[in-house]
């Protein structure tokens, strides 16, 4: 009889047993978020950034039906180069495992799996959220409800700017997901430094985030996630005029071609890449590398606090 287990990679398994800092990383950025061959190069660069800041990277994905926390380089290469690779949210994990699929985990699935094995910090680029026209389509990312019930800290550059940012923040409030800005009281706009929306709270250091996590654990009254919104510096953002023009054009094309559901985000990200002649890709890479560095420093601070 086949059994299904989450398999930690050797390095991740040892780090978790020893109480050393570990940072979860998603694999959809490898298989669906970045074009080939940049995807594999950037995936390795993200992992190295985590290592350079003192933590162990744990890229999560599914290989032939086996859910792996801490893909080795051969497994990472497989998800970056083979077809098809399924895009796996939480609801897809069991079906994908039973059918022996190769799969890349979304923010929702990565968060849930990381928390299940005891990883408390996760770095990504931008969250999913409430899609534009959601009042008619009910299209809302599973990231939001998953974070409402998963005790994970997610370092991100806000939600993808192709979404309805205001509605997403409202849903996060309703679902009880904590949101703090990293050295800012303005919510980041993914490609842009800010989205135009204010935040109630900000934190100034990895140690302060670690204190927030300790307070959450010791209180024992909030079982949901914490979003640490880490904005790009103004001089590293995508040109705002180019962003707005490209977004309007991409949304119009989306409607003409009838793209819906899980296909919307990769479609629009690919359109941004082509229409900005690679500028958005460069910004996207800066985002995830900055977030990986901050997430690692938070994980180091949290591990140090726990060991004290």
Image: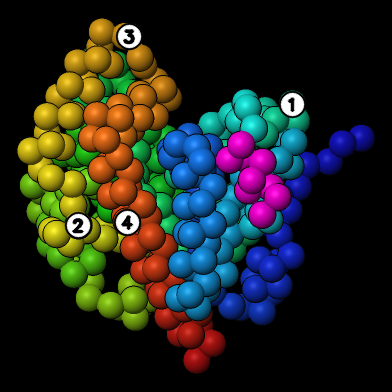
Bounds of the magenta segment = 73-81
Image location (x, y in percent) of residue 33: 43, 38
Q: Is residue 19 visible?
A: yes
Residue at 10% x, 48% y is: 197
Secondary structure under tag 4 reads helix
Q: In the rendered structure, are the residues bearing label 4 and label 2 in contact, judged by CB atoms less than 8 Å apart?
A: yes
Mark 3 vs mark 4, CA separation in Å = 31 Å
Which of 68/215 is in front?
68
Above/below status of 149 relative to 186: above
Q: Nearer the viewer, residue 223 or 61?
A: 61
Are discs 2 and 3 less than 8 Å apart at CB?
A: no
Q: Which residue is mark 1?
A: 99
Compared across the picture, whether 190 is left or right of 264 comes to left
Q: Which residue is mark 4?
A: 286
The residue labelled by disc 3 is: 258
Magenta-span inclusion, residue 251:
no
Tell me how far mark 4 sits from mark 2, CA to CA: 8 Å
| Foreground residue among 151 and 105 | 105
State which mark lies toward you, 2 or 3: 2
**Cβ atoms under marks 1 and 3 closer than 8 Å:** no
| SS assignment for the magenta stretch, majority | helix
State which quadrant residue 136 falls in.
Answer: top left
Distance, label 2 to label 1, CA atoms, is 43 Å
């Amino acid at each position: 009889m086949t059994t299904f287990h989450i398999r930690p990679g050797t390095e991740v398994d040892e780090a978790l047993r020893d109480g050393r800092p570990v940072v979860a990383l998603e694999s959809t950025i490898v298989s669906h978020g970045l074009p080939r061959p940049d995807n594999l190069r950037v995936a390795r660069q993200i992992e190295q950034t985590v290592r350079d800041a003192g933590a162990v990277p744990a890229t999560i994905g599914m290989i032939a039906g086996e859910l792996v926390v801490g893909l080795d380089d051969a497994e990472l290469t497989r998800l970056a180069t083979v077809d098809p690779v399924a895009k796996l949210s939480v609801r897809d994990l069991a079906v994908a495992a039973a059918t022996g699929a190769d799969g890349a985990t979304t923010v929702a699935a990565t968060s849930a799996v990381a928390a299940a094995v005891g990883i408390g910090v996760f770095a990504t680029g931008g969250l999913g959220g409430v899609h534009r026209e959601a009042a008619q389509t009910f299209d809302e990312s599973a990231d939001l409800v998953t974070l409402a019930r998963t005790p994970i800290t997610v370092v991100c550059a806000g939600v993808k700017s192709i979404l309805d940012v205001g509605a997403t923040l409202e849903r996060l409030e309703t679902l009880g997901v904590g949101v703090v800005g990293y050295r800012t009281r303005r919510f980041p706009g993914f490609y842009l430094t800010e989205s135009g929306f204010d935040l109630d709270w900000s934190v100034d250091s990895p140690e302060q985030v670690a204190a927030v996590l300790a307070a959450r654990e010791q209180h024992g009254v909030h079982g949901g996630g914490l979003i640490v919104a880490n904005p790009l510096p103004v001089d590293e953002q995508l040109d705002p005029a180019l962003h707005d023009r490209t977004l309007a054009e991409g949304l119009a094309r989306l409607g003409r071609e009838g793209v819906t559901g899980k296909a919307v985000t990769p479609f629009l990200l690919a359109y941004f890449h082509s229409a900005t002649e690679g500028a958005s890709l460069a910004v996207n890479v800066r985002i995830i590398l900055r977030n990986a560095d901050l997430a690692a420093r938070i994980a180091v601070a949290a591990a140090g606090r726990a060991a004290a």
